[in-house]
Image (cartoon, rainbow, N blue to C red):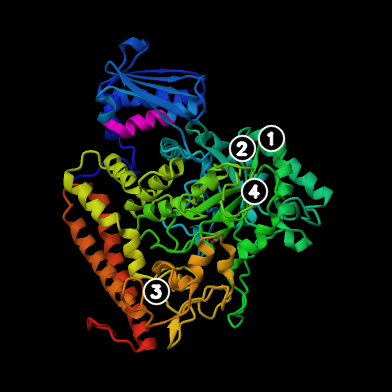
Amino acid sequence: MTNSPTDVHPAWLPPAALRPVGARRVHVAGDGPLVATVRAEVAAATTAHGGALVDDPAAADLVLTVDPALDGADAFVVGRRDGVTTVRAGGDAGLLHALHHVVRQGEAAFGADHEDERHAPVEPVRMLDHWDNMTVHPVMGQVERGYAGGSIFYADGKVRHDLSRVEAYARLLGSVGINAVGLNNVNVHATEARLLTDHLDGVVRLAAAFRPHGVRVYLSVSFAAPMTVGGLPSSDPLDPDVQAWWADAAARVYAAVPDFGGFVVKADSEGQPGPFAYGRDHADGANLLARALAPFGGTVFWRAFVYDHHQDWRDRSTDRARAAYDHFAPLDGRFDDNVVLQVKYGPMDFQTREPVSPVIAAMPRTRLAVELQVTQEYTGQQRHAVWLGPQWSQILRFGLWGDGGRTVADVAAGAGAGTGAEGAGAAGTGAARTGGIVAVSNVGDDPFWTGHPLAQANLYTFARLAWDPSADPVTLLDEWIGLTFPDAAAPVRDTLHGILDDSWRTYEDYTAPLGVGFMVRPGHHYGPDVDGYEYTPWGTYHFADRDGIGVDRTRATGTGYTGQYPAPWREVYEDVATCPDELLLFFHHVPWSHVLHSGVSVAQHVYDTHWAGAERTGSNAAAWTALADEVPDDLHARVTERLAEQVRSAHEWRDQLCTYVFRHSGIPDARGRRIY
Ligand code: GCU
């Protein structure tokens, strides 16, 4: 199939995806800046596909109206009566969501009559953090952990002159309900610290590009900015001059960007400055910034990713997994109302498989946001086709106090009964206030946005799960396929499901086993290196020897980490007999011969899963080859190249892991496959 003439891939909004709406007579009514966006979207679609934007609602097939009487500015109801599809939205943002709901439904939106259905987002804040730098780092590139080229926001140390790419991105995000974007890396370097000051005009322009699509902008700030930018002698949060500096900085930002969202902060983490330098704690630090933002309605997203990155591997008493809870749980109740504590989903660092962070269950009097990683730092770096929908769905639906209790998504949404004063006790009914769902973006200036074209599915699925964490991820993937490849023949849909549905599990199969994590090459984190992190200061060890492997995090004999969970998990994880296989080596050190619930030994599990996973990458590549005539040539070629690298890399992982396990355990593969 030949290519489309555009330089940049349209992702899930190619013109044909808007055909069902564009072929109709559409009436749009209401006030608010986003109504203009809806009208422009409909005008373009109807011009392209033969419909019309009509003034008379009685002459329309689709009526889109803002109705302030409806509860919730983001919410909408959609029904169909007498052959007319009618939408009422609580505000202009809801109208934009409603339009794209109808787009996603396609022809089905104009089928049989039905009663009104209400739609509203579960999570109030649905945010993407860009780890973009203004300048290019010689090793890290421009986007930290970015696998899709340079930044779409910045070039040559400034906000880009031409923001048309950002406008296209904002449209994509608005269409799936993302409403917040962090504009720069959480590791704030010297140039980026001045986004608050010298580069504020650029922030104004970026905010203007996002605003018509309902997306507010946030800045990552450096805790040391009063010194490095302001020239003060200190950044002590209790120093009145420091407080005045932040108040002034916030006032200047809001004078320029009245709907500015607020700050994202990484403090006392991996070398970033923070309140510890002054003997203050993280509540002091977060509240300093919160008080500067409060007069303007801004929010601080304060990250809980705080741990000792100068650990001594000889010291078995320190456990990095414990760090966030140990630092933050004692501070519950001390954060101001406009502080949201942003917690990575697991206690370590965005691994393929980790238990859910116990911090999420431990702070009922704190607003919490859960942080996911759409950029595939540890999951194949957008060279491997790894669709993370099932991972995120599992995390968001995880019952922190057992099945039937509140989930991770509930805590982030602030949903639940009670006052929260009862603490993270048995019932887990404490009502936190709303935080939201945040993820690190996977987008760069690559023509396909995400390097691997199929990684667009991750961006899409993240956004849709943030809107409704209970949605079935495979249904969302199907939605993405239908929008992105609207005219493709049936085999495209089947092949994409075949490649992506189980791709997270496949990746887990050929990489670090049973929740132990890492085993990646240090620094860039791509490819296998079983002992690469074993004697480093990073606290990411697996402790393999001739007898066994895994980290003892039990209360009985290990680091005591299991004690950070509420019941039932503190008991389930503590006991090797009840700990789920997929997390066994995260919680326990076991012999290579230990028999899993699945019935095979740890050693045999490694052999079986690594062979199966690597083999699946080969069959995926072959299935994709058969689609050469069904999808655009450039996209086909890019995916082909990435799948070939995935096959190579998966076999490298397989051979290193199997050899490592055999050499350490001496246990042969029961199926006699080749081990080097
Ligand atoms: C990981 C990642 C870093 C990043 C950090 C963070 O450690 O490798 O590049 O800065 O997470 O989330 O702050």
Residue that carries the numbered disc 1 in the rendered image: 296
Asked which secondary structure carries label 4, the reply is: loop
Rendering quarter of residue 251? top right
Marks 2 and 4, Cα distance to the nearest angstrom?
Answer: 22 Å
Nearer the viewer's eye, disc 4 or disc 3? Answer: 4
Mark 2: few/some/many CA within 10 Å (<14, 14-19, 20+) = many
**For residue 649, above or below residue 195:** below
Residues in magenta? Answer: 97-106
What secondary structure is found at the residue carrying circle 1? helix
Distance between the alpha carbons at the discs numbered 1 and 2: 9 Å
Identify residue for label 2.
Answer: 260
Can residue 261 be seen? yes
Q: Between disc 1 and disc 2, whose residue precedes?
A: 2
Q: Judge whether 12 appears above or below 408 on screen.
A: above
Query: CA separation, marks 3 and 2?
Result: 42 Å
> Residue 322: horizontal and vertical position, in percent?
60, 67
Q: Is residue 281 left or right of residue 311?
A: right
Of the numbered discs 2 and 4, the one sitting upstream in the chain is 2
**Mark positioned earlier in the residue sequence (3 or 2):** 2
